[in-house]
Structure formats: structure tokens, C-alpha cells
Image (tube, rainbow, N blue to C red):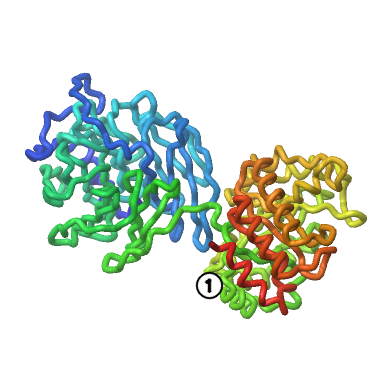
Amino acid sequence: MRARVAGTAALLLAGALSVAAAGTPAAAAGSPPASAGSSVTAAAIPLPSAERTSPAVTSNGPGRTDLFNTSSGGDLLQQIRYPGGSWTRTLNLGGDLASQPAAVSWAPGRMDVFARGTDNALWHRAYTSGGWQSWERLGGILTSAPAVASQGPGLLDVFVRNVDNGLSHKAFAAGRWSAWERLGGVMSSSPAATSWGPGRVDVFVRNVDNTLSQKWFGGGRWHSWVRVGGTTTLLNSQPAAASPGTDLLDVAARGSGNSMRLLRWTGSAWTSWTALGGTFSSGPTATDGDAAVRVLGWSPNGFQYESVRPRPTGTWSAWTSVDAYAAFRRLGTWVDTLDYATLDPASSVADMRARDVRTLYLGTARFNSARDFFDETEMGQWLDAAHAAGIRVVGWYVPGYGDLERDVRRTVAIGSYVSPAGQRFDAVGVDIERFGSDGEVTHAQFNQRLVTHLQQVRTRTPAVIGAIVPSPFGTDPGNRWEGFPWASIGPNSEAVVPMALWSFRSNFSASQVYTWVKDQTTRTRALTGRRVHVEGGVIGEGSTPVTPARVQAFVDAVRDGGAVGGSQYDYATMTGHEDLWPILDQVNG
């Protein structure tokens, strides 16, 4: 969860928290207490199978979401959604972890992540001063994943299940960690924790009968365990907790039918469990910030989904997927920097929306542009208009490699650009084209510097990268781009956009368009192992006229070839060819 900023009173209370006496367990959650490092071991109560893959979520700053998972190999994984943008690619933060993570932020620019290590100890990694610190071992013997809450800046409270299946607690205050303290209880899941401000911490656990119990710190002491939520709603996951404001609590858990359920403390009483819907293969995670609460979990279809309630009295949004590849899915269209002078962003975007376009591929500059952005003012207008219309934007740059540092800088600039309205590009595209007499380097130099370019961009931006590549046909032996470095494209990009420009083939029939485009699509997937968005023919160029029958063949090939999206190049040349848009819209199916 994300903590609100707390005052100095929390610093005084943290000391009391670290030495508070253990509360008396309620009958529903009673057990002899034991420390996290106790040598007395009770029979382990199995954790829900959904726990190991559950995510953690927090926020490193206003409008930002930070999502953490644990890989099958035990590495900590992070994705970021910046304000005004989409999810980044997955970043590997290393580790040797044996549980799902827990995460919290006590102030903008600071995050703390915890997990159980393969040695069953508590491990911690902090993000501060713009970078991640090394992993820190905090000891203990854990039999669950941890939970963490923060009462305010410089304050952390971490909770785990110990070897006796009870709750143990460790606090950070005044720059140091306390010893473990035991808080009793009998838990059949990992705990959940949240804080609505200085002097208050709430912890929730699943009982052995799959109901929910609560323990809280307030008034300078720990209070006894209390069963909440009744006895009829049974939980098949660990809980997750968040607080949207003082004296307000939200607790989520997976219930019957593997859907999410919600329990709320409204300031004077607990509500009944209500349905949040969805179907999930993991337990939930939850976070709060700016009075909003978001809940996330993994679905059986391989995506993570989130639902957000923007304020305590608001309604929950529909479940939406956490999809780093969303910008490359479904129907796209293209605007080159050469089109800036003739197209109006506002009216053009309105027309794109009416045509059901999902992504705008927007040129930002070329290697021979005078500036890093060809026209930053108009570029921002395109981006703001598209996002206002619900259209994603991939900013793409054409490198020349006569000046590699320039090409890297201009590409990275796309990933860090923020428009006047606070919008960011949803992905970064590298348009890999060689120009004959206008080229800056030789064929061999281009191939080598292309690889270096992609590698350096990935070290300098977490943005999703789309490699816009020649068709595999064009790189076959004897063709124009023999020796193209296909082996390096997949490892250095998230999506690949082959220029399957079928209009340049020799007077292809519709059936030939289908066969050729499908072949380029499947070969690109095989050569890179990445998701593919196919760029098609160009109206008015090449030997094969663009007709409705051929566009239909293109769309069929895109879908049958397993691509996630497709587009016709480009938007400007579609004027006067309105009959093609309904055909292209089938890509959205």
C-alpha cells in the first residue's frame, strides 16, 4: 500500500510500536505466540496455492503506479505506469525470493519492497535517491510472505507468519530496525497490513476456518484479535488491505468462484462482503493514494487486472488489464513528420477515433532533423489529442547511425517526453530503414550500430520498445538487406513491426497478398519470439494497387498469422479511400 505523509508524532509512536506487548488472540485466531526466529515449531498450516504468484503494488509518486511480481526463478520484477502513460516493460531487479513481494512508499521518491528469501529470512530492498539499494537481509524464520505498512516518512512496520503460524512484527524507525516481537494468532495465509496515519496500523489474516481476523495498533497499544466479516464468506486467498483516509479501511480477498470480494470499515462499522467480480488465479494486492484505492491480481488468462475506486464514496471501475503491449494491439495508423504540415491534429484524431483506430504511430524526428523533435509543439498536440480520444501513441524515430549518440539521445527522449497536458508516449518505436545515397553509414556499420543502439536505449529508459523492421523477405540471401541482425532484435525489443509493404510486390493478386503477408508475419514471430504488429501496403506506391479485396486479404493474413495488430501506411493517403476503413477495422476483432 502507499502511506500518506505523517507528522512527527508517528516517530514517537514507532518506538512504542516496536516494544508493544503482544495482544491476546481471539478464539478464532488463538495460538501460543512465537517470534519469527523461534526454535519452537508448530505443524505448518498450508498457505493458499494462489499466494505464490500474487503481485504487490504501491506508488512512488502522484499519479504513478509501481507493480511488483516474483519470477519463477525468484527474481523481483517491476513494471511502472507513469502519469499520462502506459505500463513500461518488465524490469528485473534480481533477488533470490521464495514468496510474493510486499511493497510500500512512505513519500514520493521512496519505495521499500520485502519478500521471504529462499533461506526463509526476510529480505528488503529500498528505492531512494533515484536508484535501488542492495538487498538487505533482516533475519527471522518466515513461513509466509511479509506484509508492510508505513505510518509516515521514515517509518515501516513489517508483519510475517512465524514458525508457530502466529504473527510476528518488526519495525523501522529512527534509522534502525527493532527486534522481532510476537503478536499471537493462528494464520492460514500471509498477513495484510495498512495504516491510515500516525499511531494506527491494521493487520488482517485468514483464519484456519478461512474467515478473516483483524488486529490493530492504536492508542499506543496493540488490541486483541477480532473476527471481522462474519463466518459465511470463506476466503481462498490471503487478504490485501488499503486505507483511503482516516478511519477508513478496505480489505480484498479472493472468494468462492475465484472472484474478488471486498470488506469495508466505514468509520463506525464493517459492511458485509461485496463482490468486485472478475476471475483470478492469484490473491489480490491493494494500494491507496489520493483517496483512491486500486486492487490487482492475476487472471487465469495470463494477464494481471486492476480495478480502481477513485474516492471512498465512488464506484469501482471495470477490470482492465496490465498490458505492456497494448500499444501494438489491434488497428493502428501512421503519421510521419512529413505530414505535420498538412494534417491538423485535432480533426485528424477525431476522424481516427471515428474509424476505430486504437494506436497512432507518430513520427517524432529523423536522423537528418535539425532538432531532437522535428516539431515539439505539434508533436505534443498530436499526443494530447490522441490520449483525450482514448488512442494510444507510439512515438517513432528514424536513425541513421552516422552519429550514434544523437540517435540514442533522440530515441530515449521519446520515452521521457511529457506533453503540456502531462501525457507520455505509450511506447517507443525505432524505424529501421536504410537509405541509399542519403544514408550515413555502410551496410555493415548500420547492422552493428543498430544492435548497439537498441541495447543502449534499453539501459536508459524503461519504456516498451517496438522495433520497426524490414520484412523477412527483404533480408533473405540475395535481397536488399542480407545479414540483417535478426538474432538481436527480439532480445532488445518487446514488439516487432515488420514493414510487410505488399503494394511493392509485383502486381500481386489478393490471394498472393494473403500468402505473402501471412508468411512475413509468421516468419517475423519465429525470428524474434516477439508479438507482431504488421504494417501493410502504401496507397499510390508500388506495383500492386491498393484495393478493398487486397486490403481484406491483408487483414485476413494478419489475423491468421497470429499478429496482435495491423495497420495501413499511412493516415494521410487514406483520404478518399473511406471504403477501406471498415475492412481494416476487422483487425480489432
Residue 210 at what x, y percent from top left? 18, 41
Residue 527 at what x, y percent from top left? 68, 41
Question: In the rendered view, does 117 fall on the left or right side of 379?
Answer: left
Depth check: give the residue in front, 8 or 509.
Answer: 509
Question: In the rendered view, does 414 fall on the left or right side of 212?
Answer: right
In the image, is residue 402 above or below residue 397? Answer: above
Residue 261 at what x, y percent from top left? 25, 54
Please tell me whether mark 1 sits on a helix, a strand or a loop.
helix
Residue 221 at what x, y percent from top left? 14, 44
Q: Check the image and name the residue furthest to the left.
A: 27
Question: In the rendered view, does 345 fall on the left or right side of 148?
Answer: right
Q: Residue at x 46, y 36 (%)?
A: 71
Depth check: give the residue in front, 588 or 511.
Answer: 511
In this orientation, does residue 238 appear? yes
Question: In the rendered view, does 219 fall on the left or right side of 521?
Answer: left
In the image, is residue 146 above or below residue 296? Answer: above
In this orientation, does residue 110 appear? no
Number of marks drawn:
1
In the image, is residue 372 above or below residue 107? Answer: below
Depth check: give the residue in front, 163 or 520.
Answer: 520
Q: Residue at x 57, y 57 (%)?
A: 329
- Residue 172 falls in which quadrant of the image? top left
Q: Residue at x 54, y 67 (%)?
A: 422
Q: In this figure, which residue is indicated by the disc labeled 1?
A: 388
Three-letter amino acid code of the residue under disc 1? Ala
